[in-house]
Amino acid sequence: MDKERKIKEHNLKAQERALAREREAHHNDVLKLAKQDLKKPKVAPKGAFISLKNINKIYPNHVQAVYDFNLDIKPNEFIVFVGPSGCGKSTTLRMVAGLEDITYGDLYMDGKYANNLLPKDRQIGMVFQSYALYPHMTVYENMAFALVVKHIKKDEIDRRVKEAARILQIEEYLSRKPNALSGGQCQRVALGRAICADSKLLLMDEPLSNLDAKLRVTMRSEIVKLHEAMGKTTIYVTHDQTEAMTMATRIVVMSKGYVQQIGTPEEIFNKPANLFVATFVGSPSMNLLDAKNVKDSLVLEDGHILAMEKGFNNKINEFYANEIEFTKKEIEGWKDTLLDREHGSKAYSHMISNGQLRKDKFKSYVNKLDDLVLVRLKDNKESILNRILKLEHSEEMIKQFDVILRNYLYEMNKTTNPGIVKVLEKLGQLIACSKEEEKKLTLGIRPEHIIKEETKTKESFELNVSLSELLGSEYFVHFNYSGIDLVAKMPVSNKISNGDKVIFSFDKNRIHIFDPVTKKRVL
Ligand code: ADP
């Protein structure tokens, strides 16, 4: 038992070391790119007030907090970065503020290349979660402090502080010290300080997190009104999707350092780009059900059939064809960076004659390769490559294997590259899906789009309520549907109690379809 544990620990440590090496290699590549990139001319994109181009952040401890962040912000926009804790929102905001270096990528502010601008030269006002007010200064002095440091004339300071205090309705507290103010008032002073600075850009990092629920709602609308009145370009960071939906002109949804979707609140809600966005935005979360498409209909796990519009099946096939093309291009993209490794190209040359792949050698090589790949992918009984091979033997795929193989050769001779393995695996799964007559899909339906019906029809459901929660203006009604907790929002016109039998249907215009492999939106 002890021996087993030791082996496990040893393996875990080895994996960690391999991952650390992998990260370091990747980060060195990024740093090299960053160095080369500095030599390129920096031209600000037209029409954008703030522009983030391929922004990456790697902390010195090799944690990559942000990957390829791209966003153009127009003047007067209220942009909200939203996502779970640790997804890279604050890091991105701090790079815009100049409080963190940008590892790779370009930042433009007001037409200027801004990567190297000092924070004080960026004309920004910042509001943090902690109000960070000076306790020994009055509200007036707190708001005026940054202006005094900049040697702005006294009467100009007075004008700005009083104007900000008027907008924020804190005029009567100007002579008080922060400890004589409530949390909400302190946050207003912090806001006032940012406004006074006469900045062009307002940055806010979870400014309402320390306030109680009721005050948060009040402050939320105050900030929106303030933005409407002043029109200052704003970037606002929050983990709260309700704040994002109610405040933003555009939302950037992030997860694990990657941008998942950028769009207006309506776009994000009505057309979530993937399963992450679909379930992160909206409360209660979107219900997800396993389904398969049979011709132009969807069949749920219990055999329930939902007829969809004509051409539904074609649209799904189109999605897979596009995704396969897209993934192949992704693999092609590695060619330049990975293929010129000496060792790999030597082994590869055995299988090429006149620039063509020799199928006989190719297959025997794949078999040999399999063992090696298997070692690295212990959890997979069968190697990815073998699986792909079984699925597709066409000339066109052989050509594709040409690329895949070369990448595997790289794999064998160099370190494992989880990125490559993942994309190869994805390609295999996508091809498998595209060949299925009945494709497995994920059906998404929001609680508000489940409709209570009076009479049972072929497509409606009849289930017992497992839990009915009254929220004043509506019910959250839970059903146990094929082992899944299905939640519906229903009006309070009729009383709904636990155990009641309820007939309901899905609003078919509001059904979302996702692909379980890529997690992307299909329709
Ligand atoms: P969020 O604002 O979305 O909660 P952050 O931008 O603060 O996320 O953090 C993103 C990731 O970067 C996290 O994994 C976090 O642990 C890491 N991180 C943040 N600051 C540092 C730092 N100074 N050094 C190393 N890692 C950091």
Image (cartoon, rainbow, N blue to C red):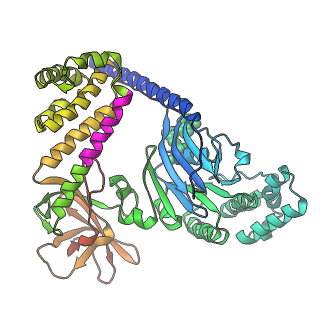
Decide whether residue 167 is among the magenta residues: no
Residue 456 in the image: above or below residue 37 = below
- At 75% from the left and 66% from the top, the residue drawn is 164
Query: Number of callouts in the render?
Result: 0
**Direction from residue 168 to residue 211 in the image, left or right:** left
**Viewer can see residue 282:** no
Q: Position of residue 329 (x, y in %)?
A: 30, 41
Q: Is residue 114 above or below residue 290?
A: above
Tell me if residue 325 is in the magenta stretch.
Answer: yes
Q: Position of residue 480 (x, y in %)?
A: 21, 62
The location of residue 65, given as percent across then percent down, is 50, 39
Question: In screen coordinates, is 296 left or right of 86?
Answer: left
Q: Residue at x 20, y 17 (%)?
A: 350
Residue 300 in the image: x percent, y percent?
15, 60
Q: Main secondary structure of the magenta part?
A: helix
Q: Which residues are magenta?
A: 323-337
Quick check: 372 left or right of 250? left
> In the image, what residue occupies the spot 13% across and 36% down?
395
Q: Does residue 273 lie above or below 220 as drawn?
A: above
Image: 457 above or below 411: below
Q: Quadrant of residue 360?
A: top left
Q: Can the viewer see residue 462 in this picture? A: yes
Residues 188 and 215: in front is 188
